[in-house]
Image: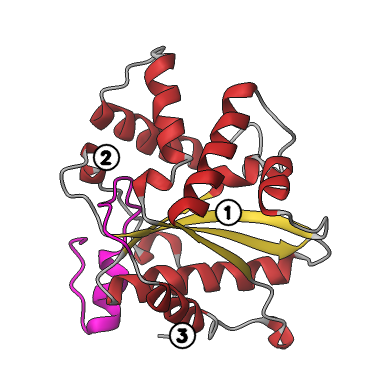
Amino acid sequence: MTGLAARNETEAAILSRRSIRGFLPEAVPRETVEHLLDVAARAPSGTNMQPWRVIALAGEERQRFCEGVTAAYLAGAEPQERDYYPAPLPEPYLSRARAIGWGLYGLLGIARGERDKARAHMVNNLHFFGAPVGLVCLIDRTLKLGSWLDYGMFLQNIAIAARAAGLDTCAMAVFAGFPNTIHALLDLPESDGVVCGMAIGREDRDAPANALRTARVPAAEFARFRGF
């Protein structure tokens, strides 16, 4: 929870949402996951296009998927689905990215140049950080920027609805880096683009990575108010 005080239950769910990187092995029932997706699908979308497509993985199917993507990672790079960041990354975004990167590595005891430890963290990442449920989020490749904006609201709805249900999440762009492997593992049509993954489960409060707290710039710094 941030220092900002919640004024209602909705705000409490929003303010308590964090990217969790260590989960308990407790199963999450299919009915719960399906309900979260039904709630999230109330997100607004241009002309009600509802561009989201999701494959929810648990149990042996989740394990098979994670092992397949991990094998692809260890074998070497494959073409990215898209550029997630510009290169080079300008300020202030570069400083923010470095702060969270080194903050997380510090909690995990990964020093600069410790490639084996960094690789092990990546493998954990590709296993949804141990979460019992992993979502693979897809979009029709013909859709444009507006539908991607809609998709962001859908993903946020999942995260907030999960918090209201006592669950935790982590949206995971890393999976967009393995489009060919994911298409093969899940037998996807060529028209499906990989947006991201999302882990769903209950936070393991003993996981070092979950001690990470990130700051937010207040509205007074990023917004302009006129006519008030």
| Sequence-first tag of 3 and 1 | 1
Name the residue located 66 percent from the left edge and 61 percent from the top edge. 138
Residue range in magenta is 1-27
Q: Which residue is mark 2?
A: 209
Inter-mark Cα distance, 2 to 3? 43 Å
**Which is nearer the eye, 188 or 21?**
188
Per the image, label 1 sits on a secondary structure element best described as strand
Q: Is residue 133 above or below residue 208?
A: below
Query: Can you give x and y, in whole percent of width and height, for residue 94 in the image?
Result: 49, 36
Measured as percent of width and height from the top left, residue 47 is found at: 73, 87
Based on the picture, tell me whether residue 132 belongs to the magenta stretch: no
Question: Residue 113 lies in what quarter of the image?
Answer: top left
Q: Nearer the viewer, mark 3 or mark 1?
A: 1
Question: Which element type, helix, strand or loop, lies under badge 3?
Answer: loop
Give the side of residue 104 with respect to residue 228, left or right.
left
Q: Is residue 218 left or right of residue 135?
A: left
